[in-house]
């Protein structure tokens, strides 16, 4: 049942002069998130949305969404509907002056943000479900994209590490330049130097022409080294030299070439243990691990599996010229998907859904239509690592921003997109100081 117009959920707009109302409305829609929510709800006047669906749509934390919705409701351009889970919808203002301001705003072409233009952001949003772990990752990505700091993306196979790397590039100031991806696991030592540094004509047998390396091609752009933990110690030494000097020479060449690139690395290996065992150089580890982003495995967010499976199924239908609801899962099929440990994570789930949709003879996909690639995998063999709590993640996130800004609080607040007052409050709340070190659960 809809809440009454003048209920606590939908308080009336404070009266004021037309000039006051216009100033308040301009301030309201000055926030990209508030403006986006207002346009989204207004474009769907017959629909209602819960906070979780809006969180996934906009890639924002629950508190951010709820605070913005509260301000829209207080102004009279949105309403909340109570009874079970609170839902939100657009509302036509009763005051004609405010209705006119709303109409004028909606008639203007919406500014498309860099985030909305990035293809990888749209792909990442498809990986967000009801669990807020991926929204925390989204905030880390936004922070990392604001500077050229080296980023290490940690996560199991198929969890979306390259999607995150491309997001950081597409949201950074280097977006107009090239993104060069190198799979270190598929690069033997004999090819490492020629692939990364390039070579001159005649440098070796078969070198018929000059070829620039990936480091040179990534100049002014981003170099992504996937599975960096698979590099040999010899390759690590050569990479470290290039990172320190920002200068390379092609094989067979005698001219030094200056390179300016942003480094993003990814691995599914425990690099910290590799350092301890002497399998990964400690100095290189600190170079690539200036800012770490950990992606959770799919089994760490089981509540998202039905949401993601339905999303991938709709995409399969669209790609094959079917209506989005041409196929659906039977309840026992969903239960089977949730019981499986998903060693291949998001990538495996998407391919499993596509196979099931193809093999299902009818509209409904049954449990017998689902075929897993790792049919003999035992769920007990996969014990998820403990994730930090939201409080621990926020503390670590703020600490990283402060350290990157050299404890310049004005700069750190700008990077985090919060006020300095909020930052000071958080510093006191979490007891942060320049000598504080994050605990193991906060890294």
Image (tube, rainbow, N blue to C red):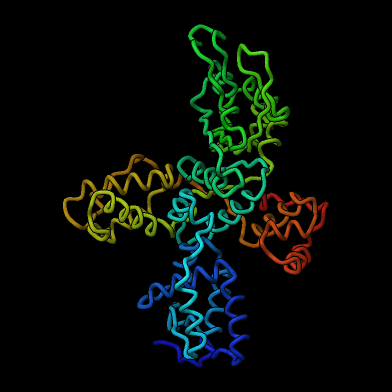
Between 258 and 12, the residue placed more toward the observer is 258
Q: Look at the picture and state if 256 lies above or below 349.
A: above
Q: Look at the picture and state if 242 lies above or below 366.
A: above
Q: Residue at x 62, y 80 (%)?
A: 23
Most extreme residue toward the left is 361
Q: Residue 375 in the image: state x and y as whole percent.
A: 33, 41
Q: Residue at x 54, y 63 (%)?
A: 60
Q: How many marks?
A: 0
Q: Residue 382 in the image: state x and y as whole percent.
A: 47, 45
Between 266 and 274, the residue placed more toward the observer is 266
Q: Residue 361 in the image: state x and y as whole percent.
A: 16, 51
Q: Residue at x 47, y 48 (%)?
A: 120
Between 105 and 163, the residue placed more toward the observer is 105
Residue 411 falls in image quadrant: bottom right
Compared across the picture, whether 256 is left or right of 339 comes to right
Compared across the picture, whether 108 is left or right of 256 comes to left
Q: Residue 140 in the image: state x and y as whole percent.
A: 61, 53
Q: In the picture, which quadrant includes the N terminus? A: bottom left
């Amino acid at each position: 049942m809809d809440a009454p117009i003048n209920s606590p959920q939908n308080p009336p707009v404070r009266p004021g002069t037309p000039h006051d109302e216009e100033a308040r409305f301009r301030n309201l829609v000055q926030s990209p998130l508030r403006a986006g929510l207002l346009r989204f709800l207004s474009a769907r006047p017959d629909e209602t949305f819960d906070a979780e669906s809006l969180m996934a749509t906009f890639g924002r934390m629950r508190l951010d969404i709820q605070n913005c919705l509260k301000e829209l409701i207080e102004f009279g351009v949105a309403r909340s509907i109570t009874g079970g889970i609170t839902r939100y919808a657009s509302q036509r203002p009763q005051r004609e002056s405010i209705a006119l301001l709303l109409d004028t705003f909606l008639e203007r072409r919406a500014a498309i943000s860099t985030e909305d233009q990035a293809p990888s952001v749209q792909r990442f949003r498809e990986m967000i479900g009801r669990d807020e772990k991926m929204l925390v990752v989204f905030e880390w990505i936004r922070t990392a994209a604001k500077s050229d700091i080296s980023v290490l993306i940690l996560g199991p196979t198929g969890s979306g590490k390259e999607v995150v790397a491309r997001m950081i590039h597409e949201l950074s100031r280097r977006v107009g330049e090239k993104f060069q991806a190198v799979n270190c696991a598929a690069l033997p030592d004999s090819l490492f130097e020629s692939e990364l540094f390039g070579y001159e004509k005649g440098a070796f047998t078969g070198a018929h022409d000059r070829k620039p390396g990936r480091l040179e091609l990534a100049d002014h752009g981003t170099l992504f080294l996937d599975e960096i933990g698979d590099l040999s110690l010899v390759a690590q030494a050569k990479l470290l030299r290039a990172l320190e000097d920002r200068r390379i020479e092609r094989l067979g060449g005698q001219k030094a070439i200056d390179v300016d690139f942003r480094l993003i690395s990814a691995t599914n290996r425990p690099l910290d243990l590799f350092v301890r065992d002497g399998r990964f150089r400690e100095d290189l580890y600190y170079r690539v691990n200036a800012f770490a982003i950990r992606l959770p495995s799919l089994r760490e967010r089981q509540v998202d599996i039905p949401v993601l499976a339905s999303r991938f199924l709709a995409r399969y239908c669209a790609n094959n010229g079917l209506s989005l609801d041409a196929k659906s899962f039977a309840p026992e099929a969903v239960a089977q998907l949730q019981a499986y440990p998903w060693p291949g994570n998001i990538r495996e789930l998407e391919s499993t859904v596509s196979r099931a949709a193809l093999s299902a003879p009818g509209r409904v996909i049954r449990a017998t239509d689902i075929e897993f690639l790792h049919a003999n995998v035992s769920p007990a063999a996969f014990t998820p690592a403990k994730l930090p709590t939201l409080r621990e993640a926020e503390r670590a996130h703020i600490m990283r921003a402060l350290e990157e800004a050299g404890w310049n609080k004005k700069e750190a607040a700008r990077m985090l997109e919060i006020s300095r007052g909020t930052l000071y409050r958080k510093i006191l709340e979490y007891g942060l100081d320049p000598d504080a070190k994050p605990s193991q659960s906060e890294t």
